[in-house]
Amino acid sequence: MSLSINNLFGLEGVPKEDINQIFDTAFSFREVLEREVKKVPTLKGITIVNLFFEPSTRTKNSFALAEKRLSADTVNFSASSSSLKKGESLKDTVQNLCAMKLDVVVMRHSVPGSVRMLSKFVDAVVINAGDGTHEHPTQALLDMMSLKEKFGKIEDLNIAIIGDIKHSRVARSNIYGLKTMGANIKICGPPTFMPADVEALGVDYTYDIDEALNFADAVNVLRIQKERQGSGLLPSMREYRQEFGLTKERMNNLENKVTILHPGPMNRQIEIDSEVADGENSIILEQVLNGVAIRMAVLFLLSGNR
Amino acid sequence: MNYITKKTISDSKTLKRMIARLSHEILEKSEGIEDLCIIGIRTRGEFIAKRIAQKIGDIEDTELPAGILDVVMYRDDFRDRNELPRLKGTDIPFDVDNKKVILVDDVIYTGRTVRAALDAITDLGRPSSIKLAVLIDRGHREMPIMPDFVGKNFSTATEEEIQVKIEEIDGEDRILLKEAEKK
């Protein structure tokens, strides 16, 4: 059994069977991560380049660790120390790297669609580690894996996504993936953070966080990008916290139990209170471990497709 | 490639006897069941291992630890295969350190699966010994690996296939000799 996709640009259009196979494979790799010796020789001889044109801690380290656990050889490349500074184009940079016989390219870039474009001129498997406001498929996969671990299924779960939906690749990938897997989705945030194509996305939306929380089995809390303050899109941080933050008081008043996810990095006391983030219903740290397993699964399944 | 059945090597009765005999041999050669554990290689080996563990447990009136090994992560033909075998995971709910491991598979052929299985087990710990039990040894080894317990030696040609059917997966117990269909 192989995946129907040859690259991972996003979750839009990826069939359910593929996503389920990625989950099954990832749960097998989770077992490896819990061993004393956390390494398997699976990708021995496979060379992977990690191209990060945007800052990243979590995703970059998670991919790096996944690659090491699978015994792949890796090259790391960050924009600040490369010839891009000398004016070399992305295409030239990547084609040069690929002339060194690479098998897989993992890329993060600020331009939506850049990862798909890249795949047109390289003969390697291409994996999207976040392209602008477009998609961040491995994040959504690890979110869904964590839900599956917690609830045993994804179908018919009620999932709320709260925050800056419009600028969030995490939200977009989650919406595509969760819809494919049969979950019910409600997005919630200030009107200025609602995507223009909210109807086309085919999800419910609300501006009322209490409505979203009452609906939800689990809530995915997005990071508020502080740099958007002053852009006219966002009120003050205090006001955002009052209207859309997962505050201790708000969560204590809820009748239903809601599982908490956050893709990180968190702005504590803004979109989420520490008591909630570190509370018993939070699966934020499980997400991190599952992230390594999901990336191992994606690397394994796509490298094997070559 | 399509395979057509040439003959039945074992029916359910002879397969049952084969497993019973293997269980007795393992028990006898292991000098007691202390530290003994049975690990089956996915997919068919898993169920044969369970039956052997059950049988030995019945004879000795005890419960023998049994586990499942997935060797897909350890295969050496990862790049050459068109179809990726599905990874289902290893499930060994006990520590293999200082254990006497009996590794179980349905058929031994090139020996490459067993090579992968040895790597997989030694990544989990350091057993005091590993022995190999198979239902059918069909020859054509490509590695210096020999089973310790064999249900039946059966010489084959390379274009032939041995198919072990197991009740739990295939709905019946039967071992078949198959041959590639000639075009």
Image (cartoon, rainbow, N blue to C red):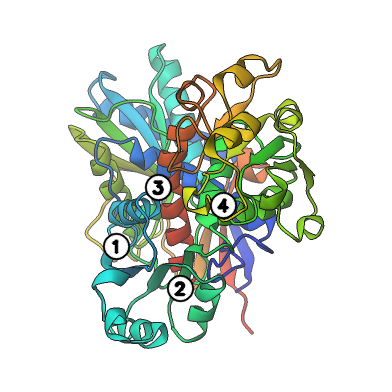
Mark 3 and mark 1: span between their CA atoms?
Answer: 14 Å
Residue A51 lies, with reference to residue A240, above or below; the image says below
Q: Nearer the viewer, mark 4 or mark 2?
A: 4
Q: Chain of mark 4?
A: A
Binning the other alpha carbons within 10 Å of mark 2 as few (below 14), some (14 to 19) or many (20 upward) gives many
Q: Are marks 4 and 3 in contact (CB under 8 Å)?
A: no
| Amino acid under disc 3 | Val
Residue A72: give its label: 1
Do marks 4 and 1 share a chain? yes
Which picture quadrant has residue A133?
bottom right
Q: Are marks 4 and 1 in contact (CB under 8 Å)?
A: no
Residue A125: give its label: 2
Say whether disc 4 or disc 1 marks the residue closer to the N-terminus.
1
Residue B31 on image: x %, y %: 22, 23
Tell whether A140 sits left or right of A288: right
Q: Are marks 3 and 1 in contact (CB under 8 Å)?
A: no
Do marks 1 and 2 share a chain? yes
| Residue sticking out furthest to the top | B61
Q: Nearer the viewer, residue B65 or A282?
A: A282
Q: Quadrant of the N terminus of chain A?
A: bottom right
Residue of label 3: A292
Residue B32 on image: x %, y %: 25, 19
Say what secondary structure mark 2 lies in: strand
Residue B112 on image: x %, y %: 33, 59
Q: Are marks 3 and 2 in contact (CB under 8 Å)?
A: no
Mark 3 and mark 2: span between their CA atoms?
Answer: 19 Å
Point 53% across, 80% down: residue: A117
Q: Are marks 1 and 2 in contact (CB under 8 Å)?
A: no
Residue of label 4: A170
Do marks 4 and 3 share a chain? yes
| Residue A113 visible in the picture | yes
